[in-house]
Image (cartoon, rainbow, N blue to C red):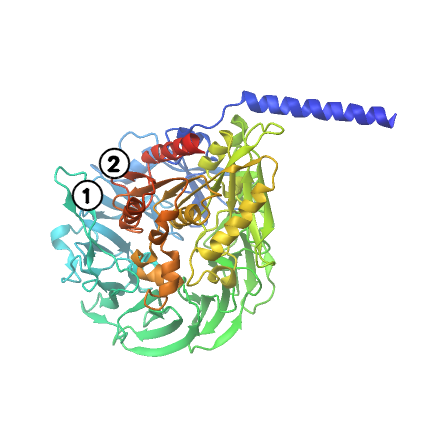
Amino acid sequence: MKKRFSILTLMICGASMMMSAQVQKEKPVYTLEQCTPGGEHFMETYPEYLPMMQWLGNTYVYLKEDKLIAGKGGKQLSEQPLLTVAELNDILPEGKKLGKTPYFPGFSVLKQEEGVVALSLAGETAVVNLLQRKMLSSYPTIKEASAFDWSPALSHRVLVIDYNLYLQAPGQTREKLVQITSDGTEAVVYGEAVHQREFGIEKGTFWSPDGSKLAFYRMDQSMVEPYPIVNVRLRKAKEAPVRYPMAGMPSHHVTVGIYDLNTGKTVYLNTGLPKEKFLTNLSWSPDGRTLYIAEVNRAQTDCELKAYDAVSGNAVATLFTEHNDIYVEPLNPPVFVPGKADRFIWQSRRDGWNHLYLYSTSGKLIRQLTKGEWEVTDFPGFDAKGKNLFFVSTNPSPLDRRLYRIGLDGKGMKALTPEEGVHSPQLSPDRRYFIDHLQSPTVPRSYTLRRADGKTAFRIFEAPNPDDKFAMPDIQTGTLTANDGKTPLHYMMIKPLNMEPGKKYPVIVYVYGGPHAQLLTDTWHRGASGWGLYQAQQGYVIFTLDNRGSANRGAAFEQVIHRRLGEVEMQDQMTGVEYLKSLPFVDPERIGVHGWSYGGFMTTNLMLTYPDVFKVGVAGGPVIDWKLYEIMYGERYMDTPQENPEGYKNANLLLRADKLKGRLLQIHGDIDPVVVWQHSMLFQKACVDHRTYPDYFIYPGHEHNVRGRDRVHLHEKINRYFRDYL
C-alpha cells in the first residue's frame, strides 16, 4: 500500500512539474524594451508604485492621474482626493494655469510639516500650500541658473548663475537679483558640490536655521589643469573642458564663505593650511552662531570635527579627531537633538562598523548608541519628544535593511520592521506614524502605514506581481567562503529557463566589485537587473558575487583592497567561478564577464589575468590606469602614485594588454567626466602595440552611463556580443 502511494505521489508531482513547465513555455519572455529603464514598455516589468508618495503635514499623499490623493493615520485605510488639477488651477493666477492635462504635476516639497511645495509653471516657480489650497508666492524663472536652494522661511532662494551666487526674493527678475559673489569663473566656482561629490557632498549652499545667513562652498580649481572633453554633436566640434584632479597631481582649494543677509557682508572661514584638504559635512548649530565642518586631510587618514564662529570666521574648537591608518570617510554631518542645542549625533566607523554616537558640543563623547557587527545605513531622525531616535541598519543580515528605534540612553533598541527585505521608511512630521515602503524576494512593492511602535495600522498599497505575465527564471542565492578560510561571500545565480537535463549552459558573471556598491540584497529579484533576467531567459546562467571591497559589510571587509585594487576582488570572483565549474549544468568553456565602471575595470582585469577561463567580456566605462582617476576616490583606496608605485603598476591594465586572448568589447561615453575616455582609448592603443584585438564602441553624447532610450541600444549591443562569441 505504501509503495503504491509513493508511486502515485511521484506521478502526481511529475505531472504537476510538467504542467508548470508547460505554463512557463506558454508565457512570453522579456523584450529589451520591457526590461530596460528607458525602454518603451519598461513599466510592464517594473513593480507598480505610488508616485510622489510622501508626507505633507501629517497627511500622506501620492499622485493618481489628475488627483493628489491624501490619507491619514487610523485603524483602516481612508483616502480621498486632496486636490485635482482643476482645483489646483483655481489657486494659480491667470496666465500660469496648467491647462488641460490628465496628470497632476510633480512638485518639490519645501516645508513638509506645513504642506508647502514648489510647482514649476510657465516662466516661474509657484510656492503653494497644498493643504491650505493657497498660493504663497512666485519666483520668476532664471534660465541661466544651474542650481538653487530655498531659505527656511521661503523668503529667498539662492541661485548659481555663471559660477556666481545670487539671491532672489519673490517676484524678482534677473536684473533685480542681489549678487553675492562676483569673481566666479570656470576656474573659481561658487555654490556647487565640491570634492568630486565624495564624502556625501551633494550640494554647495547651506542656510542657517533662521535663514539669516548662507554658508557656501568656494572652489578654486585654477591649479588643476583643464581636461579636454569635446562636444562632437555640433557642426564644428567644440571643446568643453572640465577641471579633473588626477591622483598624485595638484588638487583644488576649497573654502567656505558665510553671507549675512542683514548686513550684505561675507566672511570666509579661516580653515588654514594646508589648502589641499577636504571640507565636508557642513552643519549649522541650532542657534545659527556656529558652523561645524568635518575636515579631512588629503591623505584621508584624519578627520577633525571643527566649530567655526559664523561672524568672525575663526575656528573656536576642535571637538575631536578620528584617525585610521588606512582611511577615514565621513559621510554624514552632525545632527542636533531636538530641544538640546548642546547634543548631536555623529556617525562613524571607528569600531569597524558604521554606528551612531551621542556627543556634546564640548567634544565629549557621551555614549555610543548603536553597537554590533552590522552597519547603520540611514538615520531618519528622532521621535516627537527627542528621547529616541530611528535608524535603518543591516541587522540582522547584510542583505536586509530594517528600521529600528533606540533611546538616547542607548537602551531599548527595538525592531520596527521585522520582516525580511529592504525597508525604506518615511516618518510623519509628528512621528506618530511612518510609511513602510518594502521590497523583498516575495513582495514586488508594498506601502504600509505603521505606528511609531512598529505595529501595523493598515496596508496602503501592494503592487501586483509583474512576473505573473512572463516566463521567469529561477533565482538562487547562497554563500561561499573566501580564500582566507573565514569570510562569507554572498552570491546570486539566475538559472536559464526550462533547463534540460544533461545540457550545459554558458555563464555571464556580472560584476562591480568596488566600494559603495552592493549588488545582492533581499529586495525584489534579489537586486537582479532586468537585463540579467532577460539573459537568463535567453539561455545563460547569470552569476553575481559581492566580493571583499564592496559595501555594507564593515570596514575590514572593505579596506582589505587598500593599495592593491583588483587583487582580492579577483580572488573572490574566482572563488565564485570555481563554484560555477563544479555545477553539472555549467559549461566551463563558455564563461563570460560583464561590468561597468569599477566593474569595467574588473571585467578587463579578469580577461587579462585569467585568459583561459573567461572567453568573452564586455567592459563599460572601465578604469584602466588608476593614475588617470580623480584624487578623492583614487587616493583613498590607492594612496598617491608616488606613495604606492607598486600598487599602481600592478593595477595598470595597459601593462598587460598583451595578455588578451578572448573576445573583449569595451564601451565608453565620449563625454564621460568620471572615468575619462582616455582610459579605454589608451588600452586600445596598448593592444595595437601588442597585436591583441579587442572590440570597441563609443556612445556619443553620453557621460559615465548610457541612459534614456539609448540604454536599450546598449543592452542589445551587449546581448549581441555574448550571443555571437559566447
Q: Compared with residue 369, is residue 108 higher up or lower down, i.e. above or below?
A: above
Q: Is 724 left, or right, of 479 in this rendering? A: left
Q: Which residue is mark 1?
A: 231
**In terms of image quadrants, where is residue 163?**
bottom left
Q: Compared with residue 312, is residue 253 higher up or lower down, i.e. above or below?
A: above
Q: Residues within 10 Å of mark 2 (few under 14, many from 20)?
A: some
Q: Amino acid at mark 1?
A: Asn
The residue closer to the viewer here, 495 or 651, is: 651
The residue closer to the viewer here, 652 or 129, is: 652
Q: Which mark is residue 97?
A: 2
- Judged by depth in the image, the label closer to the viewer, 2 or 1, is 1
SS at circle 2:
loop
SS at circle 1:
strand
Q: Residue extending furthest right?
A: 1
The answer, for residue 394, to whether it is visible in the render is yes
Q: Is 168 left, or right, of 712 in this rendering? A: left
Q: Earlier in the sequence, mark 2 or mark 1?
A: 2
